[in-house]
């Protein structure tokens, strides 16, 4: 199988991580969609031996240590570590477009992405709110779900989000019965279809402290969250909630759970990143393709220093491979 990798922002640590990943032998072919000159320059700067092969779509092969297949996506301007150039923004989006088209056609089994910087893309005059939203647009997917997974342990922690990058003041209005229904269905479907979990047990956070405390601390649980949970439980989904977020993330609840659904970004992700930052994986659920990513940003200050840690990219690749191997022949999502 082939796996497409996009390193993301070239001035950040993405290229460093791909080069580190290429120092290992892999049973599958890794195809990096990027500027080969930039990758070679970065390898030289890091003092790491790297042999680049021009990608050949007609020849799939395993990857030997120190070798990397590269599908050329040239940068507009020369790259400088730690100094992002908005002129190179379009190249990053082109790489994503090529990767997605390859995944949709079956050329690539999955897409693994490095970190991008939203501000640099926007500075180039291109509206861009993030990888997740852009991939949904490219695949014409109405609804996607962000889920992060901490490293495998006795109990792997998976946290999905009902809302993603929203100001806190907008979260309550964004959680509607329709949107919450869609998110839970997508989460349940993909845990079955990509993780081979027959009947996923999903814990659902309340929005307010103490899950609203019977309406004394907010009505969202009573008016929106509980009715959706009850309706889906009647349809056979294995759900529990709404639960207070301050007690949900304890062994009592997590030991038998397959995933947690948090209502907003900073309700669930601080816990997950405390458990596994630098080793966790970002997964986009609901897409017609498999996409995993690192759990960190561009880290401009580490680019080209040799101090960037490849753990999250390794984990993202491993999860993409596992998801590909466990994926059911067909699936349908709310669209």
Image (cartoon, rainbow, N blue to C red):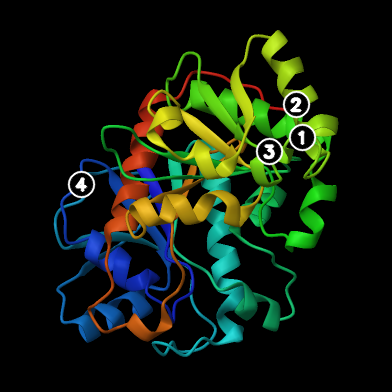
Task: Give the quarter of the image for residue 89.
Answer: bottom right
Q: Eyeballing the image, is 270 above or below 115?
A: above
Question: Residue shown at 53%/62% (left/top)?
Answer: 95
**Residue at which label 1 appears:** 221
What is the distance, in whole Å, between disc 4 and disc 1 at their CAs?
A: 47 Å
Q: Eyeballing the image, is 126 above or below 110?
A: below
What is the distance, in whole Å, between disc 3 and disc 4 at their CAs?
A: 46 Å
The mark nearer the N terminus, 4 or 1, is: 4
**Residue at which label 2 appears:** 226
What is the distance, in whole Å, between disc 3 and disc 2 at their CAs?
A: 10 Å
Label 4 environment density (alpha carbons within 10 Å; few <14, some 14–19, many ≥20)? some
Asked if the residue at tag 1 contacts the one at tag 2, i.e. Cβ–Cβ closer than 8 Å, the answer is: yes
Q: Position of residue 172 (x, y in %)?
A: 80, 49
**Residue at which label 4 appears:** 26
Q: Tag 4's secondary structure?
A: loop
Q: Tag 2's secondary structure?
A: helix
Asked if the residue at tag 3 contacts the one at tag 1, i.e. Cβ–Cβ closer than 8 Å, the answer is: yes
């Amino acid at each position: 199988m082939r796996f497409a990798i996009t390193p993301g922002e070239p001035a950040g640590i993405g290229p460093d991580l791909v080069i580190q990943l290429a120092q290992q032998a892999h049973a599958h072919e890794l195809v990096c969609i990027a500027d080969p000159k930039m990758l070679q320059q970065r390898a030289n700067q890091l003092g790491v031996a790297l042999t680049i092969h021009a990608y050949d779509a007609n020849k799939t092969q395993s990857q030997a240590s120190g070798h990397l297949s590269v599908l050329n996506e040239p940068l507009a301007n020369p790259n400088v570590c730690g100094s992002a150039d908005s002129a190179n923004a379009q190249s990053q989006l082109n790489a994503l477009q090529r990767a997605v088209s390859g995944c949709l056609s079956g050329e690539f089994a999955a897409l693994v992405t490095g970190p991008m910087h939203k501000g640099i893309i926007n500075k180039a005059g291109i509206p861009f709110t993030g990888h997740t939203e852009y991939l949904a647009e490219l695949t014409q997917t109405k609804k996607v779900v962000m889920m992060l997974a901490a490293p495998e342990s006795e109990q792997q922690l998976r946290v999905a989000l009902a809302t993603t990058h929203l100001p806190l003041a907008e979260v309550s209005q964004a959680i509607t019965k329709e949107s919450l229904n869609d998110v839970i269905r997508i989460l349940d479907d993909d845990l079955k279809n990509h993780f081979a979990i027959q009947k996923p047990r999903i814990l659902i956070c309340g929005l307010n402290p103490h899950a609203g405390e019977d309406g004394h601390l907010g009505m969202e649980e009573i008016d929106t969250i509980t009715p959706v949970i009850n309706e889906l439980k009647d349809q056979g989904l294995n759900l529990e909630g709404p639960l207070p977020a301050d007690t949900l993330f304890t062994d009592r609840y997590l030991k038998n759970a397959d995933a947690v659904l948090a209502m907003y970004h900073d309700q669930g992700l601080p816990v997950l990143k405390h458990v596994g930052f630098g080793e966790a994986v970002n997964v986009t659920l609901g897409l017609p393709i498999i996409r995993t990513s690192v759990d960190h940003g561009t880290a401009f200050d580490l680019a080209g220093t040799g101090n960037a840690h490849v753990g999250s990219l390794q984990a993202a690749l491993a999860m993409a491979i596992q998801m590909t191997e466990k994926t059911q022949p067909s699936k349908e999502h709310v669209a």
